[in-house]
Image (tube, rainbow, N blue to C red):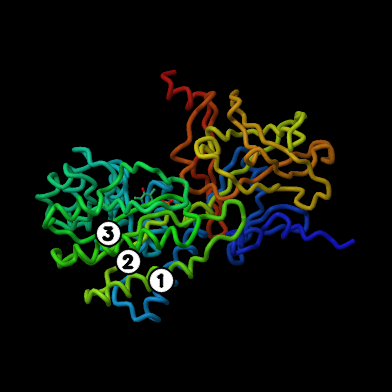
Amino acid sequence: MKPINYKQFWKLGRADVNTEFFDINRDGELVVKEGNYQYNLYDLVKKFGSSLEVALPFVVEQRLGKLIDLFDKWIRAYRYRGKFFYHYPMKASQNKEFILPIISEGGNLEVTSANELWIVKRLWEQEQFSSKIRVICNGPKTNQYLALIFELRDKGLAITPIIEDKFELAALSTYRGDVGIRLDTQVRVHGHWDKKFNRFGLTAEEILSFGRIRNLKLLHYHTSKQLEYQEDVIGPLKKAMEVYIKLKKTHPNLDMIDLGGGMPVPFQKKPLFSTEGVVKKILQIIKKRCDRAGIPHPDVLVEWGSYLVAPAQVTIYRVLSEKSIDGAKAKKWYVVDGSFMNDLKDTWAIHQKWHIAPVNHLNAKKLSRVWLAGLSCDSDDKYTNGGNYILLPRLEDLESGDQQYLAVFDTGAYQDALSSYHCMLSSPTKIIAQNGVITIARKRETAEEVGKQFGW
Ligand SMILES: *Cc1c(COP(=O)(O)O)cnc(C)c1O
């Protein structure tokens, strides 16, 4: 019989599905490789306990470096006259261990609220922020948000608020810096957020009816998260370029186009459309349209959040017990010591599918078809892979005293800020693996710490 290639079976070590950093050691344990450094996730979870989140900032750095290089390569090859700027949408993860590497690698920022903008103020006060870094401000502008936008602009930072409606147009008419405007392209796409009624942005007709918009520098749009096809990136861009070209006639300082987020992550470990292909197409489309209209090529901005940070974290749980299931594709429930509803909220909110693999016994020959049950007393706290099943080693094959751990991949985007305290469960411990060193970012809360949030 042909020996099983376990690495292939668990879809590890593959750049096309973002698992190139993961491998299996000789003992069948899951390891992460950062150049010559290696982290053994089985050892780490035994040391720090479960539930455990392992953040991998080096993955963010490498992904950003590669993306910037790709755009720069094709900008040169096509003799494109504008520049590329990556803007990190902070709502994907406001964690310091991701944001600091992003700004040091040459990323700019995008924020959605006054409190996210406060992080920029904090970085600036601690002299960790250059005034060359542009900050795009999306989201509804409360008075507090507007006041901070004006304050940071007056301190000399490149703060670019995005006008989303008529009220913001009026509120920002005295702003003494660049502004952008958000277009609702009204192009239907295949993605997670393909809403018929979009409450964000302004239609092309509305924008063009405003006449001259003071200090207009940037045209922005954002369609959906997790776009399925290359055409879902390109279709809205074509529409936005029509508007850009019209606006350029009356706004000579307009010279940036911002495509927003939505670049997908292969959560299910099936390859998606290629980043290089879409980068080439974006530049070709913009160049061609501008050349035809006789206008200069704009700078190109993207705000790809999940794309950058989702693959940079794994969440690890221990299997506590098993229960049989009758009449389903899965044969057993594995009850785990963490909560999908609390720690991986998208499982519940948008029926997110995850890639799940064992942390130990990756070379087990016999596997069970299972569903996972979370630690909260709630029937919704589960993961069934959409009513299908996942494969994990059989518990009856464990030696006595041995525990089975499992890793959920690509948990670096959105899950932290969406997390909650259903059943007063503590959040996972979070550790950071970087440069061969492990640091604790957050300890699992004690009962007292969680209780405090409820007035105890
Ligand atoms: C949420 C959001 C993003 C990031 O979306 P991803 O799907 O994570 O890439 C970018 N821009 C805006 C305006 C957003 O609201």
The quarter of the picture where the C terminus appears is top left
Q: Earlier in the sequence, mark 3 or mark 2?
A: 3
Task: Report, in whole angstroms, how far the alpha carbon at label 1 lies from the one at label 3.
Answer: 18 Å
- Which residue is painted at 47% across and 22% down in the image? 451
Q: Is residue 368 above or below residue 295?
A: above
Relative to 227, is 83 on the left or the right? left
Direction right: furthest residue:
1
Residue 225 in percent (x, y) is at 44, 50
Disc 1 + disc 2, Cβ < 8 Å: yes
Circle 1 crowding by C-alpha within 10 Å: few under 14, some 14–19, many from 20: many
* Label 1 sits on residue: 71
Residue 81 in percent (x, y) is at 29, 77
Circle 3 crowding by C-alpha within 10 Å: few under 14, some 14–19, many from 20: some
Relative to 110, is 92 on the left or the right? right
- Which residue is painted at 30% across and 72% down in the image? 289
Direction top: furthest residue:
456
Residue 133 in percent (x, y) is at 28, 60
Tell me the SS state at disc 2. strand
* Label 3 sits on residue: 134
- Which residue is painted at 15% across and 53% down in the image? 209
Q: Earlier in the sequence, mark 1 or mark 2?
A: 1
In this orientation, which residue lies closer to the viewer: 383 or 406? 383
Q: Identity of the amino acid at label 3?
A: Arg
Residue 373 in percent (x, y) is at 65, 32
Task: Report, in whole angstroms, how far the alpha carbon at label 3 lies from the one at label 2.
Answer: 13 Å
Q: Earlier in the sequence, mark 1 or mark 3?
A: 1
Relative to 336, is 314 on the left or the right? left
Tell me the SS state at disc 3. strand
Circle 2 crowding by C-alpha within 10 Å: few under 14, some 14–19, many from 20: many
Q: Identity of the amino acid at label 1?
A: Phe
* Label 2 sits on residue: 300
